[in-house]
Image (tube, rainbow, N blue to C red):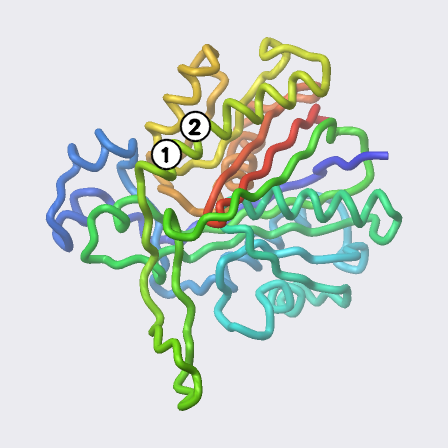
């Protein structure tokens, strides 16, 4: 027994922040950003909360699925932080939907959606759940230093959702971690305990772009090779590479190394930026809405992020 995705949904903040507008905040310009990242604009929250985006994406996926909220057996949210430290974002989504099932948050950074798929598969294949709602929701705008042009130009906010149930679509799944902190990290709050000796205040996202780039392109190449060998297929059998939208340069380098046509690498980074774990489900939803993914298409999905974490899967769309 395997799993399949029967419905998706996505939600983006109303505000689209262009490179020109961003140049009013930090020393940069449209050409500099586009040439290095491929990004022209990104959505950022103003009145919306991360809970709003997550609940909206979830409600859209549920409406498309034909299921009732009572049919959902588990809610999984991948996020690096919800509106509350506790309760979890998944509990907030459950409250908004009126769900009565267990709800769990997981943090695998940008690889969160693939990690959540792996957890969903484990629950479904062991008969502990039949229908699982996955929501990947991130508000990166609250974690970056808006005076640092090396990071603030990259990220955006958004949420994507998928409803997973029993099926035969999933053919391959692999999640991994190569623990390393300095390349990409975000310090957490330490409070004001008079006894705690590590006086670290909440900071901003820090990233070594070159090291993350090397990890990403190497990982994608290795993961594709491992997947096709495990399945006994070739790269020709893959219709779309749905990759984490971190940087257009990463996508182009991966494409070049794999020697695959650009048409197989759909992208929305030019208008969304890097939405961490939300990038793959948002892109997947947009492709489905546009009718670009058809029954029988073979999808390779892969993401990488802080940890360093990574996750990949192959699905034959049902």
- Residue depicted at x 16% and y 35%: 32
* Residue 45 percent coordinates (x, y): 37, 59
Q: In the current view of this chain or complex, which residue is farthest to the bottom?
A: 194
| Contact, mark 1 vs mark 2 (Cβ under 8 Å) | yes
* Residue 284 percent coordinates (x, y): 55, 35
Q: In the current view of this chain or complex, which residue is farthest to the front?
A: 197
* Residue 280 percent coordinates (x, y): 52, 38
Callout 1 secondary element? helix
In the depicted structure, whether residue 64 falls above or below residue 74: above
- Residue depicted at x 76% and y 43%: 121
- Report the front residue among 190 and 55: 190
In the depicted structure, whether residue 161 falls above or below residue 237: below
Residue bearing the label numbered 1 = 213
Q: How many marks?
A: 2
CA distance separating discs 1 and 2? 6 Å
Q: Quadrant of residue 198?
A: bottom left
Left or right: residue 163 compared with residue 277: right
- Residue depicted at x 88% and y 48%: 127
- Report the front residue among 55 and 300: 300
Question: Which quadrant of the rendered structure holds the C terminus?
Answer: top right
* Residue 157 percent coordinates (x, y): 40, 52
Label 1 neighbour load within 10 Å: few <14, some 14-19, many 20+: some
- Report the front residue among 48 and 254: 254
- Residue depicted at x 55% and y 23%: 292
Residue bearing the label numbered 2 = 217
Callout 2 secondary element? helix
């Amino acid at each position: 027994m395997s799993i399949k995705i029967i419905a998706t949904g996505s939600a983006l903040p109303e505000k689209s922040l262009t490179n020109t507008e961003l140049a009013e905040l930090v020393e940069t310009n449209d050409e500099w950003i586009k040439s290095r990242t491929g990004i022209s604009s990104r959505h950022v929250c103003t009145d919306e909360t991360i809970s709003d985006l997550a609940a909206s994406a979830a409600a859209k996926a549920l409406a498309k699925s034909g299921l009732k909220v009572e049919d959902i057996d588990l809610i999984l949210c991948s996020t690096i932080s919800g509106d509350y430290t506790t309760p979890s974002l998944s509990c907030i989504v459950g409250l908004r939907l009126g769900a009565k099932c267990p709800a769990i948050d997981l943090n695998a950074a940008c690889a969160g959606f693939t990690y959540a798929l792996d957890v969903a598969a484990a629950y479904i294949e062991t008969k502990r759940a039949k229908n699982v709602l996955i929501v990947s929701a991130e508000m990166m705008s609250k974690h970056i230093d808006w005076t640092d042009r090396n990071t603030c130009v990259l990220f955006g906010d958004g949420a994507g959702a998928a409803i997973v149930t029993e099926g035969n679509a999933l053919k391959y799944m692999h999640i991994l971690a190569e623990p390393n902190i300095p390349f990409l990290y975000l310090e957490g709050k330490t409070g004001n305990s008079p006894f705690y000796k590590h006086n670290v205040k909440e900071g901003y996202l820090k990233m070594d772009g070159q090291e993350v780039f090397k990890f990403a392109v190497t990982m994608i190449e290795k993961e594709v090779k491992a997947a096709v060998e495990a399945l006994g297929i070739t790269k020709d059998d893959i219709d779309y590479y749905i990759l984490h939208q971190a940087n257009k340069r990463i996508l182009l380098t991966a494409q070049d190394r794999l020697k695959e046509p650009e048409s197989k690498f759909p992208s929305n980074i030019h208008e969304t930026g890097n939405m961490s774990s939300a990038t793959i489900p948002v892109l997947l939803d947009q492709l489905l809405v546009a009718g670009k993914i058809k029954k029988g298409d073979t999808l390779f999905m892969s993401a990488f992020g802080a940890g360093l974490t990574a996750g990949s899967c192959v699905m034959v769309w049902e």
